[in-house]
Image: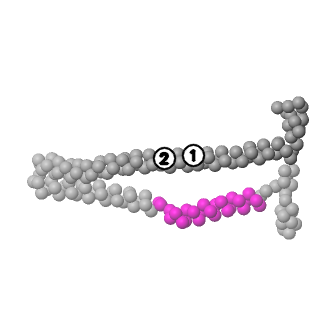
Amino acid sequence: MGLFGKKGWLKRGRGLGGGLMRSWLELLRGLGQGFLDVLRAEWEQLLADFGVSAKRLAFGVGLLGAAAMLCFWLLGTFVYFLIQVVAIWLPVWGAAGIVVLVLLLVIGVLGLVGMRFLKKIENPIDTVGRRWDDHLDWWEARLVDERFDDGTARAEDDDEEDGE
């Protein structure tokens, strides 16, 4: 369907102020309403997805909590097992002492390694400040070093070169 011709809008008496303009306005209104409907439907689907994800997260965290509780009891049982194994060669009190010393050594090494990792963590405020400064430096360098398409420097750059 063309603009001119037998079936064209202008031939049928629809001028730009007539039916054509009204039809465009109706299309734009319909487009806006359709966009809002899509946004509303996407929002509702997002909330439903979050609900499903929250249920799965809660169930998964519950299972991990149960596993952690069982690991706590397993650790105690394992320590008792180690004491009984070492008690084959030593008295029970000596076996318990050796197992305690080995556990203290492992705890100390893990603690030192953990502290080393924690010291590497940057304060979030410092991180944001550093990134902000990097962005500002980049933009400043980008605007100051900007050249014209023909390769000549900006007028400000010419003034700076004259002053040197």
Q: Main secondary structure of the magenta part?
A: helix
Residue 41 within the segment the image draws in magenta? no
Q: Amino acid at mark 2?
A: Ala
x 77%, y 47%: residue: 25
Q: Is residue 86 visible?
A: no
Can you identify the residue that label 2 sits on? Answer: 48
Image-based side of 34 in relation to 161, left or right: left
Q: Quadrant of residue 148?
A: bottom right
Q: Which residues are magenta?
A: 120-144
Q: Position of residue 162 (x, y in %)?
A: 87, 66
Q: Nearer the viewer, residue 64 or 89?
A: 64
Q: In the rendered view of the protein, which quadrant contains the N terminus?
A: top right
Looking at the picture, how far across and down is residue 94, in whole percent? 13, 56
In front of the other: 72 or 19: 19
State the residue at coordinates (79%, 45%): 22
Q: Is residue 128 magenta?
A: yes
Using the image, determine if residue 26 lies above or below residue 120: above
Question: Within the image, what quadrant is residue 4 found in?
Answer: top right
Q: Residue at x 55, y 62 (%)?
A: 127
Counting from the top left corner in percent of width and height, residue 129 is at: 59, 65
Q: Secondary structure at mark 2?
A: helix
- Mark 1 residue type: Ala
- Residue 65 shows up from this direction: yes
Q: Which residue is mark 1?
A: 41
| Helix, strand or loop at mark 1 | helix
* Disc 2 from disc 1: Cα separation: 11 Å
